[in-house]
Amino acid sequence: MWPRNQVFQKRNRIFRKVQIDYCLTGLLLNGYKITIYTEMYITSNEFDIFLLPFVHIKHTIMAGNITFTMIKPDAVAQGFIGPILTKFNEGGYIVRAMKYTRLSQLQAEAFYAVHQGKPFFEGLVGFMSSGPIVACILEKENAVESFREFIGATDPAKAPEGSIRKLYGSSIQKNAVHGSDCDENAVIESNFFFSRFERF
Ligand code: GDP
């Protein structure tokens, strides 16, 4: 490999690196970031220009170590965003993406499509689109399973003392937070809310 960041000589020609062009960056599979860039070299005695492409693939977020969560409209309306984010922090979850937004009815239907046809579906869609939510991608080892245990059962009455749903939920529907139920859905749900430029 030619030396970088300096002038160098090869086959009687002097090369000078003049520019690094950042061309493309994005996520390949979830968790892998690809960066393609070129270095432009110009020779001193002739005006030929060399573009050397470099590809850098970096693992950013480990699949299996992320989960998706929402602070639901009931918790947001009662002013629990701060306490719930503090709980995430105390639980060792690192925020990789976060968004304060509101779901339309269509978006809520799409997000909970798996529950279509169930008796609580319409109520759930109405509730989830009734006010703003906070969407987050969280990272921790074994994130999906540990986070579901951390927030407690779907029904806050059955959630353990001190869990988020016990502390901040009020009914099986208004249970304060969402947590992905498997790694595959964590990826699907994360992609539903966040572009590759919104996660870190
Ligand atoms: P989760 O994974 O614990 O959130 O539970 P599910 O995926 O089974 O359900 C999704 C969401 O639908 C829950 O978080 C509740 O808000 C709501 N939900 C689930 N079961 C019921 C139910 O029996 N009645 C009502 N009203 N809502 C429910």
Image: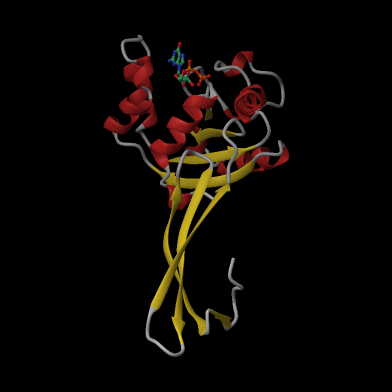
Q: At 43% across and 44% down in the image, what residue appears? A: 194
Colouring style: secondary structure
| Residue 163 position by quadrant | top right
Q: How many marks?
A: 0
Q: Is residue 138 visible?
A: yes
Q: At 51% across and 83% down in the image, what residue appears? A: 16
| Nearer the observer, 2 or 6 | 2
Q: At 31% across and 10% down in the image, what residue appears? A: 117
Is 3 above or below relative to 91?
A: below
* Position of residue 196 measured from the top left corner of the image (x, y, whole percent): 44, 48
Q: Is residue 151 left or right of residue 68?
A: right
* Position of residue 59 measured from the top left corner of the image (x, y, whole percent): 58, 45
- Which residue is the extreme one toward the front? 11
Q: At 63% across and 23% down in the image, what residue appears? A: 145
* Position of residue 62 measured from the top left corner of the image (x, y, whole percent): 60, 38
Q: Point out the image quarter for the N terminus.
A: bottom right
- Which residue is the extreme one toward the left? 106
Is 21 above or below relative to 193?
A: below
Q: Is residue 82 visible?
A: no
- Which residue is the extreme one toward the bottom? 45
* Position of residue 133 measured from the top left corner of the image (x, y, whole percent): 44, 39
| Residue 131 position by quadrant | top left
| Nearer the observer, 160 or 18 | 18
| Nearer the observer, 7 or 182 | 7
